[in-house]
Image (cartoon, rainbow, N blue to C red):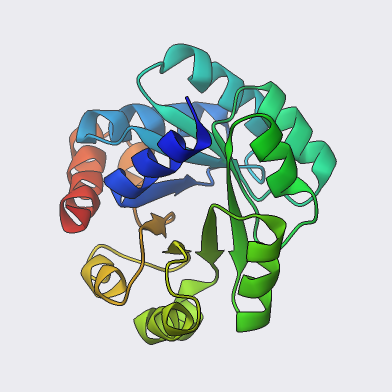
């Protein structure tokens, strides 16, 4: 798959699950529920214990899905995650060399930024998508302002977004949104209430449709 095709699948789903859970078991359970809800693209953050191994396992076990690695803060981490088969990498801010590594491996790079200067730096690095983080700090108006300065740049606001806000971010010009802590009902996950986790996740997917 080309990186253009990867970006197309990210854009088509509209809502990117950003999974930052306590351990591998919870993460795999969450992905299982999200898959049932209809998600086929997932980001596993490197702040999750054993994240690289989780990425590799999901790549093997979910051939119908795209699995990416998030919170990439250096080239070494990027190389390790690409070796595990990550389809895309996500940084919290511009990290030199990550986009180049992704492109050499035919993978996509989502580079983090917040200010116009950081967006410009992300684009200079070769970002396929600019992750606007933290989204909640500026809201949809901030995304719209960035879009007016950088027309045509794919923006993915992430951080503090719940299902009631998705439409506003998309209307503001976001190509997609990242959703994390509120997307997965952790209490329901902890008590093994699969139906509740799936129902909550499905609301996000429906708002992005």
Nearer the observer, 151 or 178: 151
Q: Position of residue 203 (x, y in %)?
A: 18, 52
Q: Quadrant of residue 34?
A: top left
Q: Nearer the viewer, residue 2 or 38?
A: 2
Place of residue 160 in the rendered image (x, y in percent of width and height, measured from the top left): 43, 69
Q: Residue at x 51, y 20 (%)?
A: 59
Q: Is residue 120 left or right of residue 96?
A: left
**Image-based side of 124 in relation to 135, left or right:** right
Residue 9, above or below 128? above
Q: Is residue 86 above or below residue 69?
A: above
Q: Which residue appears farthest toward the top when viewing the image?
A: 60
Q: Where residue 147 sits: x, y (%)?
A: 43, 78
Q: Does residue 183 appear in this view?
A: yes
Q: Is 186 on the left or on the right of 200, as rendered?
A: right
Q: Please name the residue shown 56% across and 29% down the image.
A: 24
> Closer to the camera, 122 or 64?
122
Seen in the picture, residue 64 relative to 4 is either above or below; the reply is above
Q: How many marks?
A: 0
Residue at x-position 51% and y-position 26%: 25
Q: Residue at x 66, y 64 (%)?
A: 122
């Amino acid at each position: 798959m080309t990186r253009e095709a990867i970006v197309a699948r990210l854009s088509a789903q509209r809502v990117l699950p950003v999974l930052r859970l306590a351990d591998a078991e919870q993460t795999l359970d969450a992905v299982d529920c999200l898959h049932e809800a209809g998600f086929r693209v997932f980001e596993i953050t490197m702040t999750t214990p054993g994240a690289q191994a989780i990425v590799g396992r999901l790549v093997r076990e979910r051939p119908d899905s795209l699995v990416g690695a998030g919170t990439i803060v250096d080239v070494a981490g990027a190389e390790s995650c690409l070796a595990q088969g990550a389809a895309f990498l996500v940084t919290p801010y511009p990290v030199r060399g990550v986009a180049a590594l992704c492109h050499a491996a035919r993978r996509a790079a989502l580079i983090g930024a917040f200010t116009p200067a950081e967006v410009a730096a992300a684009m200079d690095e070769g970002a396929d998508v600019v992750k606007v983080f933290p989204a909640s700090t500026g809201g949809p108006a901030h995304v719209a302002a960035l879009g007016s300065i950088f027309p045509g740049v794919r923006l993915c606001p992430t951080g503090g977004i719940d299902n009631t806000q998705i439409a506003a971010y998309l209307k503001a010009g976001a190509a997609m949104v990242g959703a994390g802590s509120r997307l997965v009902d952790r209490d329901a996950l902890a008590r093994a209430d699969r139906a509740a986790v799936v129902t909550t996740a499905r609301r996000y997917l429906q708002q992005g449709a």
